[in-house]
Image (tube, coloured by chain):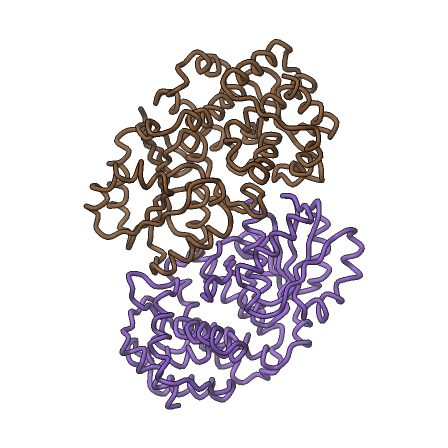
Chain colours: A purple, B brown
């Protein structure tokens, strides 16, 4: 599988552990640090340990697993560990884990001493197809996801789909939602192919294709002025539901489950507003309902979801802005949706 | 006085308040926020209020004055206020104050929603000649100055030396130390001119000249790979003493007072290591001792100062790196100084 060239950094798909070791050696770093969580230090790190040990001295920084660790308090904890370890500007941070590790590790590194190098070895399907490309780093403040962050590129990304063997099925499905999104916004053929594949373990070729699609979009529009907004499909509503669940029912929804709901709701809006055909809406709804568990929420939280949406980074001037579809495989950006339209979309999901 | 063009942004010296108002109008921002501290909201903000009011709705964010406010906790407070005010990505942050406000405001803005625009209106001599140019933002964690930050340029800087009239003499002297440094590292004629000027209120022309000097260095080497390191003269030792004082004797030293001590000590090292003549060392020592109060510290804290220096951003591989002088007006970068040499330099200052 070919190495993908992103914005000044490579994304490796083959011999990724060896490529990581070679990268660290070439970089002549004064020190390096490996950021893991309690899961990846058990399931993933051992696959690297022997080779890392050949490089000499390094330090491990382990945080708790889960979105809670993306809170600013944990970020301060990592900064303090780097200070205590006397990490200098020629240090490297290796982020070994899912999106929490890559987002938070990226933010920590991009601000420590005004920026040290970092690389990602994403270990979940979600982080391989989503967080590995695009240069977004982020942490949560006040329960608002990614409200604080930077645009900073890693120096390299090392993808090894063998790590996916250790993932529970629910985590595979979480990443799959982003892959399905890539098809819906950019490539109808890919959407059709995915639907017909064995989705319990997507092939390396399918992962590679998602990264190619996302990378193309990000390279064309790094600062999200236009086409990069396509990637927000399903995320305006999905993020709000995810944020609500994070505060009220921790661990009840994965990111993918939340944006699957978001994509159903926003496909309904697309049918109403941007020309998505009724049969396409039905096909999308049926596909997500087949793959993902239904999630119950009551009309009582509609106002709360709306107020979370108003705080979304993507909005301007107090209006809720959605990326919708004009057809399967074709996105349509900058659609202002009213409160009434959004509530109708929630109704559509709940009626489903 | 001519507008200075820095890295993609202008630094205004004339009609600066009007220029600020015109800038905000042109920018078509959705909202703007003015960050002040308890001093600048009393002494400086009133000079702008009438004109700001013509622009319509804006919000004030006020923090306590002093270095303590650069702590991460205050930074989180500002982030939360921006969240509560529902500041979107097209918002502008106007930093009205000294270096604490410009460093912290710059960091807050550069990370809020992955970066919103910000401008500086520096109100102290120190922030006018130092923080206004160079794109460094920063906050303190664990009592370590600027350990966390980004390189992000403001969209414009508005310098009005009339603000200096409200400053206590000690604050003028604090900024003056950076101006004297600019002479020592880059321009012997400027050093001589400064020494002979009325230093209780430096003229706009002298302020302008310092900004021109600093800007030239920063433009040539934005990421501090080589000549920008010249600006660190006096700061390796000065920062350590400042950090120690901040933790143990708050408010006992201004930044300028601390780096004046640092410049005496590092001139001693320059005499020992990089060819600074004995009479030049004497001239530098006498000048700083004439302008700045002597600061007593005992040999008991040498080890602590050394351990603070080891955590300095400028160091690599656990060695203390100083920028020294080879003559007045000529810097010399990347000098490794041993513990013994540094302790000797402290002795030199204390014997003075």
Q: Is residue A72 visible?
A: yes
Count of numbered circles in the view: 0
Location of the C terminus of chain B by quadrant is top right
Q: Nearer the viewer, residue A234 or B277?
A: B277
Above or below residue B198? Residue A13 is below
Q: Is residue B212 left or right of residue B223?
A: left
Query: How far from the left and from the top, in percent, is residue A241?
Result: 43, 76
Query: How far from the left and from the top, in percent, is residue A117?
Result: 61, 49
Q: Is residue A158 visible?
A: no
Query: How far from the left and from the top, in percent, is residue A27?
Result: 68, 47
**Picture quadrant of residue B155:** top left
Location of the N terminus of chain B by quadrant is top left
Above or below residue B241? Residue B151 is below
Query: How far from the left and from the top, in percent, is residue B120?
Result: 37, 39
Above or below residue A93? Residue A273 is below
| Residue under the image location 69 percent in, 49 percent down | A85
Q: Is residue B95 left or right of residue A138?
A: left
Above or below residue A287? Residue A273 is above
**Picture quadrant of residue B147:** top right
For the view shown, which residue lies furthest in the bottom direction? A351
Q: Is residue B193 left or right of residue A23?
A: left
| Residue under the image location 62 percent in, 69 percent down | A65
Q: Nearer the viewer, residue B131 or A230?
A: B131
For the view shown, which residue lies furthest in the top direction? B279
Q: Nearer the viewer, residue A159 or B259?
A: B259
């Amino acid at each position: 599988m070919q190495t993908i060239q992103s914005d000044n950094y490579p994304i490796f798909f083959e011999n990724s552990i060896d490529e990581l070791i070679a990268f660290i050696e070439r970089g002549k770093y004064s020190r390096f640090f490996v950021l893991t969580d309690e899961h990846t230090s058990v399931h993933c790190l051992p696959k690297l340990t022997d080779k890392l040990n050949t490089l000499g001295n390094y330090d491990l920084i382990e945080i708790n697993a889960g979105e809670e660790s993306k809170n600013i308090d944990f970020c301060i904890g990592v900064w303090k560990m780097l200070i205590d370890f006397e990490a200098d500007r020629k240090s490297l941070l290796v982020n070994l884990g899912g999106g929490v590790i890559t987002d938070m590790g990226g933010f920590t590194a991009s601000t420590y001493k005004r920026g040290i190098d970092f690389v990602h070895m994403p270990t979940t399907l979600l982080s391989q197809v989503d967080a590995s490309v695009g240069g977004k780093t982020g942490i949560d403040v006040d329960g608002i996801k990614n409200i604080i962050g930077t645009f900073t590129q890693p120096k390299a990304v090392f993808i090894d789909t063998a790590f996916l063997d250790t993932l529970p099925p629910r985590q595979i499905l979480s990443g799959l939602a982003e892959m399905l999104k890539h098809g819906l916004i950019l490539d109808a053929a890919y959407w059709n192919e995915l639907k017909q594949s064995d989705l319990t373990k997507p092939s390396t070729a399918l992962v590679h294709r998602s990264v190619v699609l996302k990378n193309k979009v990000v390279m064309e529009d790094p600062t999200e002025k236009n086409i990069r907004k396509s990637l927000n499909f399903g995320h305006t509503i999905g993020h709000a539901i995810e944020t609500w669940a994070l505060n009220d029912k921790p661990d009840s929804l994965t990111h993918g489950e939340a944006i699957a709901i978001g994509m159903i709701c926003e496909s309904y809006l697309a049918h109403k507003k941007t020309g998505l055909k009724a049969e396409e809406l039905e096909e999308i709804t049926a596909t997500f309902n087949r793959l993902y568990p239904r999630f119950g929420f009551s009309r009582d939280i509609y106002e709360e979801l709306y107020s979370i949406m108003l705080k979304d980074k993507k909005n301007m001037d107090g209006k809720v802005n959605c990326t919708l579809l004009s057809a399967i495989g074709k996105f349509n950006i900058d659609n202002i949706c009213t409160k009434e339209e959004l509530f109708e979309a929630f109704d559509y999901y709940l009626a489903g």
